[in-house]
């Protein structure tokens, strides 16, 4: 269910004639003047989620043909997506996929510490539409990740079949606010976005963001006045930042309906959580600048002025945070130590950790703008050197902090973490920050290599293919990069003071220790 942009609500007659429809009720003026029967207007919400089943089905068919040519097809999958009743073999395979999902990607209250991690428990849930949507989406994601880790094309075909089922059920749930609540629908959309991250390739790199565009459309229609309780406000903010990240990555403006959403959350957040709303306000304004840079020409002096303003706003935001938002250096053991090989950060909770990550990444983009546009704006050599050194120093510090925070986001779900919420593995949150670190002009060679290694390791250990795509993109970005002389000097100094052991030791090696 990929979001395909905002389609026309015009009646069929006006669309056929390619004229503007005034959408007047009960019939448009154009049809009245032409003495034609106006067929009515299209349902906007349904159109926002035009199903992409045919495209996904083509991938399944193509993959099946490819496997047949290789001669390794052992368990043909029926043409139609799986129904509720499966053969025992298929059910056990799908349960294996769900178990992979619960161990690697997701934490649900049902599987809190102390409860059995047995995916067959899901079969005991009521067979209503709400649970069926989530189960199909979970199965597709788990099988896709397992297929990547095992390099098993047959599993990937089955994963795509489940994805098709989840698409269709999610489509049906959009209007069914009685059987399927807003929260369940949004969770299904998020899971479908995760599927796109797990199966990502060069041609579908932005598909995950399209699902969050769809989430924005659902929020607008099903929840136009904003959240009404704390848990809902937190979840809406988390989704909002994912929508914002998608807009930044594609140089797109934020959907109009999403601009005021963070402020509508403020009243339902505790004083501890409210700084995230202030950060969202800064990010909203930054997205407008970032989108404009991708499509318009500006004088470098104007760009520098805007970037310096955002740098000041973000710096003040961090300085004004309450003490309860402070993070500390903390050693991690076992799998995380093997993965990151360094001292990490510990945060009061995941919500605060996410907010720090968003702040650092956006501030890095702001300072990269300064580095790129300073040479043609600053007249005096002294002023140029001072501003460039300041921007590069900030980038180096932020890059170091993002890499240090990786240990927190990659740790296994511990018993002391809040398990009453729907938690997604922190690796998904970490992908974009690591990509920005690796592609930044202010990251030292050591930090660049560390970020690439971490992305490659996420792919190898967790089967998230977007991590591999981002690692390759970072390598290409670095190859094309032109460094100022002053930055080369700073990189040497940075490498002397910042040392990250190699992240290339895999999680599996960590388990063997």
Image: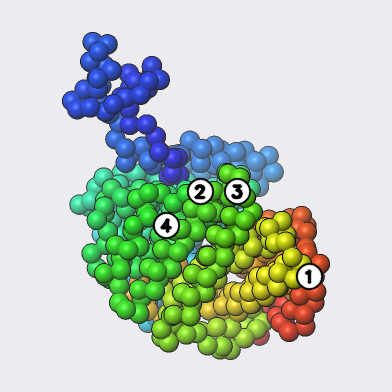
Instruction: Quote the CA–CA distance across marks 3 and 2.
Output: 17 Å
Q: Position of residue 372 (x, y in %)?
A: 68, 59
Q: Looking at the image, is mark 1 or mark 4 earlier in the sequence?
A: 4
Looking at the rendered structure, the secondary structure element under dot 1 is helix
Q: Name the N-terminal-most of marks 1 and 2.
A: 2
Label 4 element class: helix
The answer for how far apart the CA atoms under marks 1 and 4 are is: 43 Å
* Residue depth check, mark 4 versus mark 3: number of the one nearer the observer: 3
Left or right, 105 with respect to 453, comes to left
- In space, the residues marked 4 and 3 are separated at their CA atoms by 36 Å
Q: Position of residue 349 (x, y in %)?
A: 42, 80
Residue at 60% of width from left, 78% of height from top? 401
Q: Which mark is residue 190?
A: 4
| Residue in view at x 44 percent, y 80 percent | 320
Q: Quadrant of the C terminus?
A: bottom right
Label count reads 4
Q: Mark 2 vs mark 4: give the one in front.
A: 2
**Of pointers 2 and 4, the one earlier in the residue sequence:** 4
Labels 4 and 3: the sequence-earlier one: 4
Q: Return the mark for residue 252.
A: 2
Residue 84 seen: no
């Amino acid at each position: 269910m990929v979001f395909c942009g905002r389609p026309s609500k015009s009646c069929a007659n006006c669309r056929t004639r390619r004229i503007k429809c005034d959408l007047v009720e009960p019939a448009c003026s154009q049809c009245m003047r032409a003495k034609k029967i106006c067929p009515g207007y299209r349902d906007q919400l349904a159109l926002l989620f035009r199903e992409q089943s045919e495209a996904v089905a083509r991938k399944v068919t193509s993959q099946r043909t490819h496997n047949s040519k290789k001669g390794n097809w052992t368990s043909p999958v029926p043409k139609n997506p799986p129904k509720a009743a499966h053969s025992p073999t298929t059910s056990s395979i799908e349960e294996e996929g769900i178990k992979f999902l619960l161990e690697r990607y997701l934490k649900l209250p049902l599987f809190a510490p102390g409860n059995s991690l047995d995916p067959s428990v899901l079969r005991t849930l009521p067979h209503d539409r709400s649970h069926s949507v989530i189960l199909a989406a979970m199965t597709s994601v788990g099988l896709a990740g397992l297929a990547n880790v095992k390099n098993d094309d047959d599993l990937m075909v089955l994963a795509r079949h489940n994805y098709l089922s989840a698409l269709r059920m999610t489509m049906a749930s959009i209007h069914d606010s009685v059987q399927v609540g807003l929260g369940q629908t949004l969770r299904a959309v998020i899971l479908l976005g995760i599927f796109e991250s797990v199966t990502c390739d060069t041609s579908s790199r932005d598909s995950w963001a399209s699902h969050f565009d769809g989430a924005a459309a659902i929020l607008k229609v099903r929840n136009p006045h904003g959240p009404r309780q704390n848990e809902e406000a937190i979840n809406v903010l988390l989704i909002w930042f994912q929508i914002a990240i998608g807009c930044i990555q594609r140089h797109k403006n934020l959907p109009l309906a999403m601009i005021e959403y963070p402020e509508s959350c403020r009243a339902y957040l505790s004083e501890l959580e409210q700084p995230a709303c202030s950060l969202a306000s800064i990010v909203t304004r930054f997205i407008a600048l970032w989108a404009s840079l991708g499509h318009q020409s500006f004088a470098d002096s104007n760009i520098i002025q805007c970037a310096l303003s955002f740098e000041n706003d973000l710096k003040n935001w961090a300085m004004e945070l309450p003490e309860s938002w402070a993070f500390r250096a903390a050693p991690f053991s076992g799998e995380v130590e093997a993965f990151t090989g360094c001292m990490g950060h510990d945060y009061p909770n995941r919500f605060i950790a996410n907010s720090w990550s968003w702040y650092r990444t956006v501030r890095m983009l702001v300072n990269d703008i300064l580095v790129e546009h300073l040479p043609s704006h600053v007249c005096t050599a002294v002023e140029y050197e001072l501003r460039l050194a300041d921007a590069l120093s900030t980038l180096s510090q932020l890059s170091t902090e993002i890499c240090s925070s990786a240990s927190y986001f990659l740790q296994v779900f511990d018993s002391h973490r809040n398990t009453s919420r729907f938690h997604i593995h922190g690796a998904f949150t970490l992908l974009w920050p690591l990509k920005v670190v690796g592609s930044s002009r202010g990251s030292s060679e050591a930090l660049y290599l560390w970020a690439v290694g971490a992305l490659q390791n996420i792919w190898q250990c967790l089967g998230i293919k977007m991590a591999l795509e981002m690692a390759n993109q970072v390598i290409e970005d670095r190859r094309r990069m032109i460094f100022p002389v002053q930055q080369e000097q700073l990189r040497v100094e940075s490498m002397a003071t910042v040392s990250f052991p190699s992240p290339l030791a895999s999680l599996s090696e960590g388990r063997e220790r």
